[in-house]
Amino acid sequence: MTSADLSGKGPVGRVATCSPPGSPTKDPPKYREREKWTNKIEFVLSCMGFCIGLGNVWRFPYLCYKNGGGAFLIPYLICLVAGAAPVFILEIALGQFTSQGGITVWDICPIFRGIGYGTTVICFCLNVYYIVILSWGLLYLYHSFSAVLPWSTCDNEWNTPACLTVKELNGTLSNLTSLDEITGPKVDAASEFWERKVLQISDGIHNPGAIRWELALTLAIAWVICYFCIWKGVKWTGKVVYFTATFPYVMLTILLIRGVTLPGAMKGIIFYLKPDFTKLLDGQVWIDAGTQIFFSYAISLGCMTALGSYNSFHNNFYSQCIFISILNSGTSLYAGFAIFSVLGFMATELGVDVSMVAETGPGLAFIAYPKAVTQMPAAPIWAVLFFFMILMLGLDSQFVAIEGFVTAIVDMFPGYLRTGYRREVFIAITCFVSFLIGLSMVTNGGLYVFLLFDYYSASGMTLLWFCICECGAVAWVYGVRRFYDNIEEMLGFRINPWLMICWSFLSPLVTGGIFIFSLVTYKPVFFSKDYDYPGWAIGIGWFMALVSMLCPPVYFVYQLLVTPGTMRQRWKILTTPRLPMALPVNATDPDEPLRQCNGARATPKTVEQSKL
């Protein structure tokens, strides 16, 4: 650790400067002041909305059953307590302490500003492709408003002679024992609707085909909705999340109640949670647990830092983060009951094992669950409820991620982008450019592009890399004891030393171990057993990954080379915080020093002098 850290010096002070009495005053800056959350609930709901998304519904339940059922919760909870939750709290604390977005927050340790640039690149890529899921969901929602669900029959223009309805599959599947046999010459109606109607998928990424204008329209609608969710800043966004972050729980509960009342529901739930402790000896199970937990907490994107930056200085983020962590993981478990109760029903109807109908990712949301819905009475109603829930889960994750990206850029150029309506214009340009790039994912070959973005640009490997960098920068260069002092300054009490141990040792070890294992066991992006991505496409994927991952080391070396002085002097300059303003010890927001200047003069008891 650094000498400053070991010396136990107190928190970094920030100095407020006031004009001498009688001196002429300058006009205040013409840019808008940085906003704050109206209340604590808005911050908590925004974090919930961003963390709790589609992965909780379509990824965690599948991984749980695949990796030993209830036994999977053991590695999952270990990775949560030692890895994801501490890094989650670290990012929120950094944002609240500095009141800065994902890039300028690293002025707390300037040589690591490359972390901010890298996470912002990841955030931009995530925004481009994640919203495509919403465009699929909107199209499915539109088709759900029909008396007969179009994926329940085989008499549509897009169906082939190989199509079978679920009822026709019933007699076929009961005599088969493997998924390979099922997917021979016959294809179920839900799969054909997904592949031949919604995607009209081509034979590979080399054949992008034409733009699917239905999907282009729903993509545009999704971007317009996201724009108007954030265009007026966090005070407006904070109102939107009251609905988008809470309503999915209503929908999930309704679907759960319906699911557990279906015949065969218990079969699916037992399959979901039945423990197989022998799985714990498989290293891949631990990798799946670690990857899922870091995905689920949406860290290493700069967005949590942005959300924390809008808190008041003395907000008790510590208890809020613990609450959000419990709720996030609990939602994943809760969603599994809703999903697998329905899959158990479907398996019972078809007379097959649950493993033959369980899928993950888009396959669950757009094939398996819609197929199961067709077997329920009043099927269109349940389809509407399910896809509306999917939209709500994805929507707040999407617009909060956009807010995180915008905050990072605006905080770099506050004098320009906070003037007039420039922030709104910048958000509109960001949305439009992202929409144009996203059009490549709503072509006939768009799914191949989508999977390439998903696998490389915001993959577990890139997120783990930035977790390692963040912990190293704060714990070993800035100083973990110094940061604990900063947290005490904000909260008014000393938090549990467990986080100090995690940031210094456990979190880097957990994330580093998973990162190394991911590299050793790396396999190129996979679409199906019948299709392999060409080498040039995989090269583009690695380029997207390395663009962000190389930002920290490249910026680190560059700053050491261009900073004048001896190497010791350069290191001193580049590791000394460059905080943008001073805060009084008891201030509630960054503008307090200015109010003190305009009113009474600041006293030594009120303003803490810089120790740098």
Image: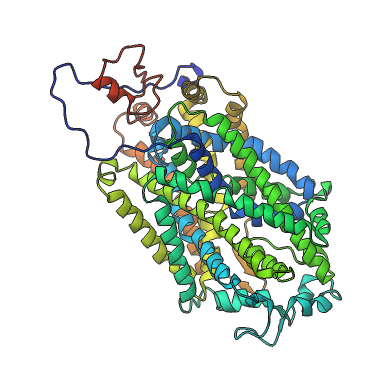
Residue visible at 38% across and 34% down? 107
Farthest residue, direction bottom: 161
| Residue 519 in view | no
* Colour logic: rainbow
Q: Is residue 470 above or below residue 534?
A: above
In the foreground, 536 or 603:
603
In the foreground, 588 or 130:
588
In the foreground, 42 or 102:
42
Image coordinates for residue 248, horizontal then vertical, percent? 60, 52
Q: Is residue 163 above or below residue 585?
A: below
Callout count: 0
In the foreground, 449 or 254:
254
Image coordinates for residue 422, horizontal then vertical, percent? 27, 50
Image coordinates for residue 250, horizontal then vertical, percent? 63, 51
| Residue 54 in view | yes
Farthest residue, direction right: 175
Image coordinates for residue 295, horizontal then vertical, percent? 59, 49
- Tell me if 274 is positioned left or right of 412 in this view: right
Q: Is residue 152 above or below residue 523?
A: below
- Tell me if 207 is positioned left or right of 105 in this view: right
Residue visible at 29% across and 15% down? 602
Figure quadrant of the C terminus: top left
Residue visible at 48% across and 63% down? 540
- Tell me if 1 is positioned left or right of 25 in this view: right
Q: Is residue 159 above or below residue 129?
A: below
